[in-house]
Amino acid sequence: MQIKRAIDKIPGGMMLVPLFLGALCHTFAPGAGSYFGSFTNGLITGTVPILAIWFFCMGASIKLSAAGTVLRKSGTLVVTKIAVAWLAAAIASRFLPDNGVEVGFFAGLSTLALVASMDMTNGGLYASIMQQYGSKEEAGAFVLMSLESGPLMTMVIIGTAGIASFEPQVFVGAVLPFIIGFVLGNLDSALREFFSSAVQPLIPFFAFALGNTINLAVIAHTGLLGILLGLLVIVITGIPLILADRFIGGCDGTAGIAASSTAGATVATPAIIAGMALQFAAMAPAATALMATSVIVISILVPVITALYSRRVKRGLPATAGDNQGMNGGATGADRMVP
């Protein structure tokens, strides 16, 4: 049976399929974990420890010795996206209820859902898109984007926007596994290779555990709103990212569109934040369901929009800039510069 191949055909499938299976388990057998106990209960309820290991391995996979060009390009995109998420948080906190919208079409929408869906780029999706429509340097920009992974940046944005407060040790605790992994991975390349190989295999495990916190009725209720959230993320983050890529990064904006995605792992953020700040506990399940839907929408639309944008931009460039790109799998750095 070609199970993995079938799952890979679904955008973010390795995250979303186990998440859905976990939601099925929670919806129809909510007491399964406590009934079986032992390792089965640990697998069903182990979102935080599994994510902690994943976060450690993610840190170990990042090389400190990234080229200056890569850091400049990725830094521009990362800073821009974080700034947009912070601004969205500051504005949304003035209009949305503290506990999120509870009734009507927008039920489940909260500042937490907006911030978490905007502040983390899908690095793998970005890299694959830019290998086709950009330069090698731009494709390598996903290195710094990996620093957005996990709940830390969401905590920083929520805290500095005045939405919630976190004790200093909570911030340290959120990032410490990542830092330790990062240090070890850069001290020993063999350790980096060893731990980084676990990043992808851990995703379905924490996704299944996370799904066991969601009732399918919540997903059904937030489906259309999740689609709208996905569209909003692309528009609200995409436009500033295009401008930053053109006028700061010195390129044509294609990388900005490619970076307007949301990482599948961001679906875990509301539950983690709720564990650190109890005021978010009530809104976490709906925020998780919203983001699960929006991840699918974004994963489908971003590659399509990037392709259309790239073709449109290259019509205004010399013939060699666009023609060679499609045949060689990526434009040269000179071809990608804005005229």
Image (cartoon, rainbow, N blue to C red):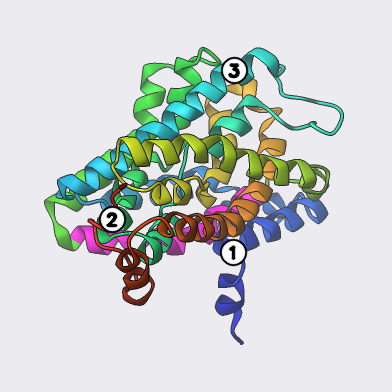
Q: How many marks?
A: 3
Of helix, strand and loop, which one carries label 1?
helix
Cα–Cα gap, marks 3 and 1: 32 Å
First along the sequence among labels 3 and 1: 1
Let me know if residue 29 is in the magenta part: no
Of helix, strand and loop, which one carries label 3?
helix
First along the sequence among labels 3 and 2: 3
Residue at (64, 63) in percent of width and height: 17
Discs 3/1, front: 3
Residue at (43, 61) in percent of width and height: 129
On residue 13, which mark appears?
Answer: 1
**Callout 2 amino acid:** Gly
Disc 3 to disc 1: CB gap under 8 Å: no
**Callout 3 amino acid:** Ile
Disc 3: which residue? 91
Disc 2: which residue? 140
Q: Percent position (x, y) of residue 200? A: 43, 62
Q: Is residue 43 visible?
A: no
Q: Which residues are magenta?
A: 191-211
- The image quadrant where one finds the N terminus is bottom right
> 5 or 318, which is in the foreground?
318
For the residue carrying disc 2, how many other residues have a C-alpha within 10 Å: few (<14), some (14-19), or many (20+)?
A: many
Q: Is residue 196 left or right of residue 7?
A: left
Q: Is residue 302 left or right of residue 52?
A: right
